[in-house]
Image (cartoon, rainbow, N blue to C red):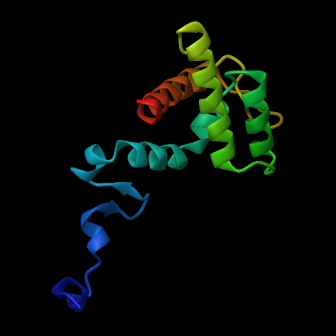
Amino acid sequence: MDRVQKAGANPWNTVMNLEDDTLKPPYDAQFPFYQAWQTAYKNTDIFAKSDGVTQYSKEYWDLWHQGEMDTASAMHETLAEMLRIKYMTGKFPDHHLGSARRGEKASSAEITKGALAWRKFFKVVNG
């Protein structure tokens, strides 16, 4: 047993922000994918309200809002659709459809904020 374990200190406290599982500097810059994924999971609602890349990806978020789809699958399908559109057109897709809970409509500001978050996340994931 090393001295850190003997002292009862948690070595993760030097690496992790335990309240949200993101990484502390300088580890956040060393592991950008992990940091982006944890940040995305922390802000899932922003991503969910602003998907709408295609009807296909929107349907995943509609199911997510109903509790019938897991977050990882919904995010994966949106990223895959973004990559497909970017590959086919050379441009980032619009997030014009927006997925909101039944009876709610995503505002233009929410869609814009989410589109920026999706693009940032996409750039980290896809290099």
| The N terminus lies in quadrant | bottom left
User: Does residue 60 appear to the left or right of 30 in the view shown?
Assistant: right
View extreme (left): residue: 3
Residue at 31 percent of width and 69 percent of height = 12
Q: Position of residue 76 (x, y in %)?
A: 63, 39
Give left or right: position of 70 versus 14.
right
Q: Is residue 28 left or right of residue 78?
A: left
Give the total number of marks visible in the rendering. 0
Judge whether 90 appears above or below 70 on screen. above
Q: Quadrant of the C terminus?
A: top left
Residue 36: % across, % down:
43, 42
Give the left or right position of residue 86, taking residue 107 as reference.
left
Q: Nearer the viewer, residue 87 or 18?
A: 87
Image coords of residue 4 (percent x, y)? 20, 83
Which of the 4 quarters of the picture holds residue 63? top right
**Closer-to-camera residue (33/102):** 33
Picture quadrant of residue 48: top right
Q: Residue furthest top?
A: 89
Name the residue: 75% across, 44% down: 64
Residue 54 in sight = yes
The answer to whether any part of residue 50 appears in the image is no
Q: Residue furthest front?
A: 87
Q: Nearer the viewer, residue 107 or 12?
A: 12
- Along the line of sight, which residue is nearer the eye, 64 or 89? 89
Q: Is residue 79 above or below residue 15?
A: above
In the displayed structure, would residue 92 be above or below residue 17? above
